[in-house]
Image (cartoon, rainbow, N blue to C red):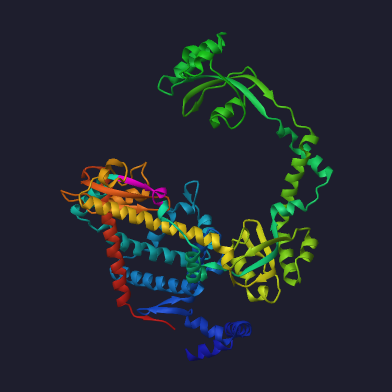
Amino acid sequence: MLQDIRDNAQGTIAKIIIVVLIVSLSIWGMDAIIGGFSGEPEVATVNGQDITEREFLRTVQIEKQRRLSQMETPDPSLLNEDQLRKDVLENLIREETLTQDAASQGLELSDSDIDALIRQMPQFQVDGKYSSERFAATVRNMGMGIAEFRNLLRKQYVVNQIRNGIVQSGLATESNASQLLQIQNQTRDFRALTIPAKAVADQVAVSDGDIQDYYDSHTSQFRQPEQVDAAYIALSVGALADSIDVSDDEVKAYYDQKKDGLAREERRAAHILINDGPDASATIAKIQDRLSNGESFADLAKEYSIDTATADKGGELGYAGRGVYDPDFEKALFGLKEGEVSEPVKTRFGVHLIKLEDIRRSKVPSFDEMKDKLRAELARKKAEDKFAEVRSKLADSAYAADDLAGPAKELGLEVREISGITRDGGPAPFDHAGLVRQLFSDDVLNAGYNTELIDVGDNLSVVARVRAHREAKQLALDAVKDQVRSTLVEQKTLEALAQRADSIIADLKQGKSADEIGAGEWVDYTDQGRNASGLPAPVLQTAFSLPRPSENQPSFGKVVDADQASVIALDAVNQGKVDKDSEEYKRLYSFLSSLEGQRDYTAYQQMLRKRAEVERP
């Protein structure tokens, strides 16, 4: 046997192996060959099971896309990459502990089980049938291999089995559900007394000394923030269209191409509508027979049609263009010749016989009437096709330029100016955090560079530069005196209203009547629920926040704003009704049970995580 090995080592097979090794070493190096035998790099090991770097990076990318999709204006620079990677790794560790726990309980899927699951997934089906081509393409678009996807599906399924089992086993007590529903359905009887701001106006006085004192103790409120004035180019499809020339010949050709569709065709129809029931076919046949014998369509519509709005008019529907009727009705109508009656047409309303009474077409607008509109349409189409190309040119040109005038002239765009942008932003497009951050970066603010070209919206990109920079400064008292006075008047009015409300409540608690206090008229609110309409929300919220009144005295509270104060007297709390057979009760009980199950599952996850032995390189 040794002799055979020795002989083969000198033969063709050995030479092929050596050539492969030499080529591999020359291309990838010895480290790659050795690394290939030692497995993929790992980012963590959970109870001896590796979480690979590839899995980690793929999950980071998925999570990044998910978080960006939740932003109103997606901006990758707003993501905290370090925190995102920590969150992803911790989630992968937690998932691995759950996967291992599922395996220890014997929860596994065979390859045939995985095949069955995949075949049932609608995203892998075409016309309701499984498509292996759709499956392969979908998985590739996810950036995964087939085996990798199958393994991920296997893990997720068994983990979900454990999760569902724990969550669905959660139980809520009937007493908790009943108590919550009683609170939710509770109503209250209360009164409200309104004190207008003018009632305390004589107590509100602001002196120059008050203004000076407030200014001196709140100087930080009266600082003009750091600001920049900027020049910028906004590249949009609309802006690009304005710079595109469209010749008269192009517009005329476009008009000739579209003019047939510019004439709106409308058709005047009549119909006979009957119910779509067992006798429908016989009734339709009878109507068709009488029509063929020369009877009037209008007379038969009066006799048979169940459309009460049109039957007395002989089934007349008037003129209408496309997009008005049910699609099947429209298809039949626009397939008729003038005076022709359709075959039976079924819609959700019933069965129709349709007669085309007349056709009218609007006049085609002349070229002169349409040319400006068509020129704008053509320019926009060209701009949409050209946007990506011009965007790339603007990005390169602005990066190399010392100003924006050159790039704007080169591409036929306009340089605009805007003033007073702070680090918190400004008017659009400087309400985009990424653009503002670039504008205040050291390179742009101090070194005089242009910003990068920033995509601030769909087909809208902006490049900017600083024209002027103003440091933050303290505003003089004279510049803000009126603002301070308004603030103090509002504060003192609120204080006076609150004191007046407190004084009324104190008098009421001592047993004085409203007439004795001279406070005004009370408004009664009886049996009001938490979502009662027609009441100011703060008044309703305060009424439901007050403690249950005693037998001898209401509970009192107040609501104060700049315009008025309201004193609330809570007279009674009416227990909410509970019907354990109602859908409301069943939904609440189910929700509470699910909530308990979720808590149990979270605790279960935490227990597995604490027990796990986790190693990180």
Q: Residue at x 66, y 63 (%)?
A: 419
482 or 412, nearer to the observer: 482
Quadrant where the C terminus is found in the figure: bottom left
Q: Of all residues shown, which one is farthest toward the left?
A: 551
Rendering quarter of residue 371: top right
Rendering quarter of residue 331: top right
Residue 198 on the magenta span: yes
Residue 498 x, y percent position in the rendering: 35, 56
Q: Is residue 456 above or below residue 17?
A: above
Q: Residue at x 25, y 54 (%)?
A: 506
Q: How many marks?
A: 0
102 or 546, nearer to the observer: 546
453 or 332, nearer to the observer: 453
Q: Residue at x 55, y 89 (%)?
A: 7
Q: Of all residues shown, which one is farthest toward the top?
A: 294
**Residue 589 visible in the snapshot:** no
Residue 405 x, y percent position in the rendering: 78, 65
Q: Is residue 149 above or below residue 294?
A: below
In the image, the segment drawn in magenta is 192-200
**Residue 323 visible in the snapshot:** yes
Residue 263 x, y percent position in the rendering: 71, 30
Q: Residue at x 36, y 63 (%)?
A: 110
Report whether 19 appears left or right of 448.
left
605 or 451, nearer to the observer: 451
Residue 294 on the magenta span: no
